[in-house]
Amino acid sequence: MLAVTGCLRVWFLSGLVDTIERMFATSDVPNMAAVRSLEWLETALPGPQLAAQLAEIDTDRLSAADRVSVLVAHHRMVAHYQARAFQETAILETQLCPGDDPHHRAVEDVAVEIGAALHLTRRAAETETHLALELARRLPDVLNALLAGNIDLRRARTLVHGTEHLPDHTARRVVDQILDDASGLTTGQLAAAVRRLGFAADPDAAALRYRRSLNNRRVVTSPNPDGTANLYGLDLPTERIVAFSRYLNRAAQDLHRLDKTRTIDQLRADILVDILEGTHTHHANPTGGLHIHIGLTTLIGLDDQPAELAGFGPVIADIARQTAKRMHDNEWAFTVTDEATGKTVCEGTTQRRPTPSQRRHLQTRYRHCVWPGCRMPSIDCDLDHNRPHAEGGCRHNHNLAPLCRYHHTIRHNSNWTYHRLPNNDHHWTSPLGRTYTTSGRSP
């Protein structure tokens, strides 16, 4: 009996070792800390091996944190197979359209074929085919990043659409500069970074594109099935639209203190219509305040590097300089930086009654809300006490950070915590124990 028990014990341990070896047989062998959780899945190379490992996981026994790791791994697998599908589409194009057939003919022939196979509309099939060929022919590094699961389809589309107006060599140079960081950026942050790099790559061409687009400015209306209507202003001057948008926000917030029956969105829409009809009587600051981030050499006209309007994103140098000139009698905060060192040279505000210097300092240091991925301008944010004032937290800058109203509420109601790092980045910890780092610099 003892001998049989010993055999059973050896058999059980041998099977357990085989199971563990099968689960973790990968080129990226997890360390012991990773074995205790499934966080290692988030960086595992996507492909058949990872797919098999995911299929063996008993999801009913996962903790919430491990479930997030499995979710990330599944998204990497989705990106991998989307890249494989794009590769097949590109190969199909070479088979159906050999030789020197025009590109538009290739897109048409391939789109017709995959549209029938995948039951897509003509427009959807052409869009899918165009994206596949852009990735395979024009931006192969983006396709490889998608294949490796380092970016997803949303980010791949952002990189393609953000560079499609650029010459091929310029587009690839822009992608080379941002691709390694793309996985850590939201699509909004990524699109802004691509615009900034595109402006910087050829400032003269960027200014020419802006002037050409401005010549096409127009207003378009369209009806909705429910009887309402839409009003669009297209290709309008950037600085005027940013200022007007901030004015709408300021006026809506003022009215919302008196009228709780309408939401902020409803108030903005009603104020817009009132202005168009000439019946608006609110007397808020007409600019709503502007915050411009611009290099010193750009401000004085020595170069044409892109600047940034808070709440909008990168703009060409001429727009920033014109905005500064036009708003010299109105309220706007400014930050002048030394492009060589990245350090702030001068900061301030031109309004007649300055805001407290502390708020101005923090708005200058942080362009946006410091929550992971949020791009709300810091001038529209609350100042959050990391350690609440009621619990002895001081009002010194190191205990304060800008958080938009939504994330300010989330941070206090959902047990998210953060601390500031020596380089002014912020290290966040979620209620699940997962960590995220947000940069003090604008992406």
Image (cartoon, grey):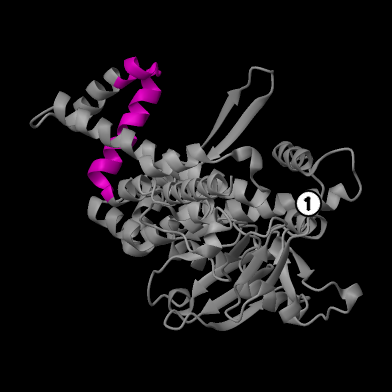
Q: Is residue 119 magenta?
A: yes
Picture coordinates of residue 160 (x, y %)? 36, 45
151 vs 203: above or below: above
Frontmost residue, 299 versus 141: 141
User: On the rendered structure, is 172 left or right of 188?
Assistant: left
One can see residue 108 in this view: yes
Q: Amino acid at mark 1?
A: Ala
User: On the rendered structure, is 8 left or right of 411?
Assistant: left
* Furthest residue in direction left, as rendered: 99
Picture coordinates of residue 32 (x, y %)? 52, 64
184 vs 441: above or below: above
Q: Residue at x 54, y 44 (%)?
A: 4
Q: Is residue 332 magenta?
A: no
Q: Residue at x 34, y 54 (%)?
A: 208
Frontmost residue, 429 versus 106: 429
Crowdedness near tag 1: few (<14), some (14–19) or many (≥20) residues, C-alpha within 10 Å: many
Q: Quadrant of residue 243?
A: bottom right
Picture coordinates of residue 148 (x, y %)? 36, 49
User: On the rendered structure, is 320 left or right of 256?
Assistant: left
Q: Residue at x 58, y 54 (%)?
A: 240
One can see residue 215 in this view: no
Picture coordinates of residue 65 (x, y %)? 64, 52
Q: Residue at x 12, y 29 (%)?
A: 101
Q: Which residue is mark 1?
A: 251
| Quarter of the figure with the N terminus | top right
Which residues make up the magenta segment? 114-140
332 vs 69: above or below: below
Circle 1: element type: helix
In terms of secondary structure, what is the magenta stretch mainly? helix
* Furthest residue in direction front, as rendered: 1
